[in-house]
Image: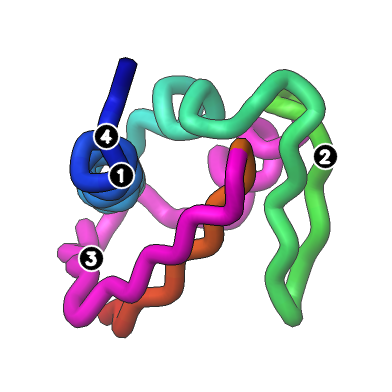
Amino acid sequence: MSTLADDKDAIRDMLHRYCFCMDSGRFAELATLFVEDGEWVAPYHHAKGRVEITSWLTQSVPPTPRRMHYTLNSIIRIYGSRAEARSVAG
């Protein structure tokens, strides 16, 4: 059985994997961080499901110049089987 600290560490790990996948153009791998019917929701685009997320990122993120994303000051709240994370990203 995982502890609250274990759950928060797993969420931090996911946030970091997201950044590494985005920065190296591994969009199909990035999409696996979402549940099968997960949603990418941003002010500029909405995509639902791993296939649509992968497709959107592949067409919209240029291969160069490469970026370097990072997350700081993450606040993670656990509510039973649900969680909410907020970070400063750049």
From the image, tell me which residue sits under label 2: 48
Image disc number at residue 4:
1
Neighbour class for label 1 at 10 Å: few (<14), some, many (≥20)? few
70 inside magenta stretch: yes
Q: Is residue 54 left or right of residue 7?
A: right
Secondary element type, mark 4:
loop
Whether residue 70 sits left or right of residue 82 in the image: it is left
At label 4, which amino acid type do we have?
Thr
Residue 89, placed above or below residue 33 = below
Residue at the disc numbered 3: 69
* Mark nearer the N terminus (3 vs 2): 2
Q: Which mark is residue 87?
A: none
Please name which of the two marks, 3 or 4, marks the residue nearer to the observer.
4
Residue at mark 3 to residue at mark 1: CA–CA distance? 26 Å
**Looking at the image, which residue is at 31% across and 83% down?**
88
Q: Nearer the viewer, residue 76 or 16?
A: 76
Precedes in sequence: disc 3 or disc 4? 4
* Labels 1, 2: front one: 1
Label 1 and label 4: CA atoms lie apart by 4 Å
Of label 1 and label 2, which has the lower sequence position? 1
Q: In the rendering, at what x and y percent does residue 1 appear?
A: 32, 16
Q: Is residue 87 left or right of residue 56?
A: left
Against 47, residue 41 (above or below) is below
- Residue 72: quadrant of the picture: bottom left
Residue at image location 27% in from the left, 73% down from the top: 74
Gap in Å between the C-alphas at discs 3 and 4? 28 Å
- What segment carries the magenta color? 52-80
Q: Which residue type carries mark 3? A: His
